[in-house]
Amino acid sequence: MTVSTKPVALVTGSGQGIGRGIALKLAVEGYTVVINDVVADPSVTDKGPYEVKAAIEAAGGTAAICKADISSAADRQMMGDFIDKEFGRLDLLVNNAGVAPRQRADILEATEESFERLMNINLKGPYFLTQLLANKMIGYQKAGIVEVPRIVFITSMSAYVSSTSRGEYCVSKAALAMGATLFADRLGEFNIPVIQIAPGIIATPMTSVVTEKYDKLIAGGILPTKRWGQPEDIAGVVIAVAHGYLDYSTGNVIEVGGGFHIRRL
Ligand SMILES: NC(=O)c1ccc[n+]([C@@H]2O[C@H](COP(=O)([O-])OP(=O)(O)OC[C@H]3O[C@@H](n4cnc5c(N)ncnc54)[C@H](O)[C@@H]3O)[C@@H](O)[C@H]2O)c1
């Protein structure tokens, strides 16, 4: 096993959107970024993981692609083995990959199939990936390779904001928020900080299908900061975590939503 001299970060679902923004910024900060995504086609270079890798390398950074479905135990194991074999260390895990329901449906009608899909990807995936990789991080610490490994969970304002047309999404994110709390608690003894980032309305392919709706809401004043969030807004907080600035804040939630969480009268 060779051990990378550079710190290594795994960002799940970083072929586009928020994960892409996080991957690019981490690479600029000197991390070798493992770009994970369930979609990764080498013949597609204008978007997706190969575009992200090329953008990182064009800026002088280092990246590798690991195609894997985080909801699959075998794929999670393969990702862990890949990191061990290729880099021999993991300094930062960013649990970013997540999906919205394929179709928004009222909770009086939404299907069990959609519920199970979201629970598998949004909850079970990051929960057990963290279990697997936290154990590896403890091993890297014991071997003296990484002093303070760190973990980020990208949850959502939907962990507490009700959207009755995508209840399964809200429930998956509320449960994941508790997952982040549990790992922060358990990993405290190992000095592995765990921070939760809860984005608000962020301009990505995920939200591109509801652009008009959110344009109107933002223009109507739903957010104190009257603009869409950008992937870079989330990435900035991840960089603060990566630098260790939030280590003593383990178990906390950082809302990145333009003040959406503020109750107003
Ligand atoms: N965009 C928003 O407004 C917003 C708000 C709050 C939270 N979030 C959360 O932020 C995260 C990123 O969202 P985004 O807007 O960038 O989404 P996106 O759909 O634009 O990108 C998500 C990426 O994850 C990948 N992915 C999906 N399932 C996967 C799986 N099983 N294994 C590995 N990769 C998988 C997709 O292929 C895609 O590249 C998600 O967890 C999402 O729930 C987004």
Image (spheres, rainbow, N blue to C red):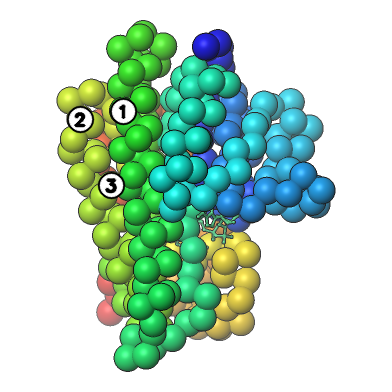
- Specify whether residue 100 is in view: yes
Q: Is residue 51 above or below residue 88?
A: below
Q: Mark 2 points at which residue?
A: 188
Sequence order check, earlier mark of 2 and 3 = 3
Q: Nearer the viewer, mark 2 or mark 1?
A: 1
Amino acid type of disc 2?
Answer: Gly
Q: Residue at x 67, y 26 (%)?
A: 62
Q: Which residue appears farthest toward the bottom when viewing the image?
A: 108
Amino acid type of disc 3?
Answer: Ala
Sequence order check, earlier mark of 2 and 1 = 1
Residue 158 x %, y %: 36, 68
Q: Residue 180 carries which label?
A: 3
Q: Which residue is drawn at 42% across and 74% down?
A: 114
Q: Which mark is residue 113?
A: none
Q: Distance between the residues labelled 1 and 3?
A: 15 Å
Q: How far apart are marks 2 and 3 (CA)?
A: 12 Å
Left or right: 124 as drawn, with respect to 34 = left
Q: Distance between the residues labelled 2 and 1?
A: 13 Å
Left or right: 133 as drawn, with respect to 177 = right
Sequence order check, earlier mark of 1 and 3 = 1
Q: Residue at x 44, y 53 (%)?
A: 71
Q: Which mark is residue 135?
A: 1
Residue 174 x %, y %: 28, 62
Which quadrant holds the C terminus? bottom left
